[in-house]
Image (tube, coloured by chain):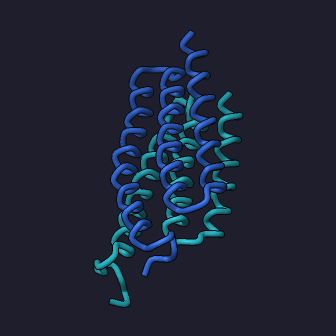
Amino acid sequence: MEAAVALVLALAMVASLLRLVRGPSAVDRMMSAQLLSTAGVALVLTLAAGHPAAQGLTVALVLALLAVIGGITFVRRFMPGDHRGDPDA
Amino acid sequence: MLEALGAAFLAGGTFFFAAGTVALLRFPDTLTRLHALTKADNLGLGLIALGLALRAGSAGEGLLYLVTWLLVLLAGAPLATLLGGIASRSEGGGPPP
């Protein structure tokens, strides 16, 4: 059961790379990255389930936190009229 | 019993992830894709976390799955709103300035 779920999640992550390549806007690419991180968290949780050490939980939490930081960076860069994160400003 | 219920939740979560990915690839513009994706993948992760929690060995481990989902939800909701604002202001889903 877990293996089948993990396979579908991995396929979803690969498919979302198509949107990452195609765009067309930066928001589309960010959504693709969001799906990659959410599906990645689910994938790590699924693969780690049932193992007593439960290290996978730590990996999943770090992955989720990295997605938050990536999202905040994106919003700071692309929010109209706010260029605090813009190196060209 | 709990095993079977957990398997059903896992299957449901997998379905929502698949649906969200198809929507991300097939929907016509940025805002519809954002709308479809943000609901589908958070719900998918929730169902998978719930399914894994039901199949977990201990209550503590199951609780940690749900806490992970809560973190993703707390981060995802405001981010989806901000992304929607950026997409709608940069007319027609074109590249932001």
Q: Residue at x 40, y 54 (%)?
A: A65
Q: Residue at x 42, y 39 (%)?
A: B69
Number of numbered discs visible in the structure rendering? 0
Dividing the picture into quadrants, the one containing residue A23 is: bottom right
Q: Is residue B13 above or below residue A32?
A: above
- How far from the left and from the top, in percent, is residue A64? 44, 50
Q: Is residue B5 above or below residue A72?
A: above
Please name whichever residue, B85 or B45, is drawn nearer the observer in this view of the structure: B85
Q: Which chain is cyan?
A: A
Please name whichever residue, B62 or A52, is drawn nearer the observer in this view of the structure: B62
Look at the image and tell me in which quarter the N terminus of chain B lies: top right
Look at the image and tell me in which quarter the C terminus of chain B lies: bottom left
- How far from the left and from the top, in percent, is residue B39? 48, 44
Q: Is residue B80 above or below residue A70?
A: above
Q: Residue at x 63, y 28 (%)?
A: B11
Dividing the picture into quadrants, the one containing residue B66 is: top left
| Left or right of B13 on screen, residue A73 | left
* Residue at the farthest top position: B1
Q: Residue at x 53, y 60 (%)?
A: A33
- How far from the left and from the top, in percent, is residue A3? 69, 34
* Residue at the farthest bottom position: A88
- How far from the left and from the top, in percent, is residue A20? 61, 66
Q: Which chain is blue?
A: B
Dividing the picture into quadrants, the one containing residue A77 is: bottom left
